[in-house]
């Protein structure tokens, strides 16, 4: 996990939430459950981003041997099938977390 990118994408999600309140002219009084919903949406966005990184890493295995030999797949630190399963888990987590908040 690349933590600066996780913070960046979580911040983008938070900026989107703040923009929605601003442009929809909604009152900005957040309850405990509103804050939990926002945190859940941020976790959903971060999970989707991690899943996309895993898909990218799986697709770029041949190139990563030359350009990024320290990554988990070129060093054989993780099995590609296990890595794929982790990516699917993060993707499903992002869908479930977003669905908990709203199916729209």
Image (cartoon, rainbow, N blue to C red):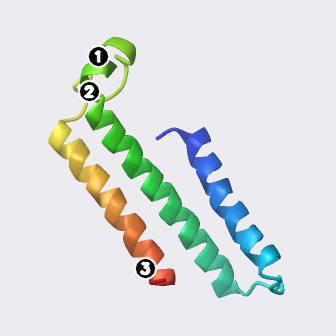
Residue where numbered disc 3 is placed: 99
Q: Secondary structure at mark 1?
A: helix
Tell me the crowding category of disc 2: few under 14, some 14 to 19, or many 20 or more residues within 10 angstroms, Cα based.
some
Q: Is residue 77 left or right of residue 30?
A: left
Instruction: Specify whether 51 is left or right of 46.
Output: left
The residue lying furthest to the front in this view is 23
Q: Quick one: 98 or 79, which is closer to the camera?
A: 98
Spot occupied by residue 34 in the image (x, y as percentages of width and height): 67, 83
Q: Secondary structure at mark 2?
A: helix
Secondary structure under the numbered disc 3 in the rendered image:
helix
Residue 75, x across and y down, in percent: 27, 21
14 over 65 or under it: above or below: below
Q: Which residue is disc 1 drawn over?
A: 65
Up-down relation of residue 52 to residue 34 (above or below):
above
- Quadrant in the rendering for residue 63: top left
What residue did someone put label 2 on? 61
Give the CA distance from mark 2 to mark 3: 32 Å
């Amino acid at each position: 996990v690349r933590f600066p990118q996780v913070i960046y994408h979580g911040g983008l999600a938070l900026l989107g939430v703040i923009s929605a309140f601003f442009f929809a002219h909604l009152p900005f009084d957040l309850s405990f459950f509103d804050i939990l919903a926002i945190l859940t949406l941020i976790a959903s966005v971060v999970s989707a981003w991690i899943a996309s990184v895993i898909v990218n890493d799986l697709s770029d295995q041949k190139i990563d041997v030359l350009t990024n030999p320290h990554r988990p797949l070129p060093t054989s630190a993780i099995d590609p099938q296990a890595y794929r399963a982790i990516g699917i888990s993060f993707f499903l987590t992002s869908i479930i977390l977003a669905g908990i908040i709203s199916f729209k």
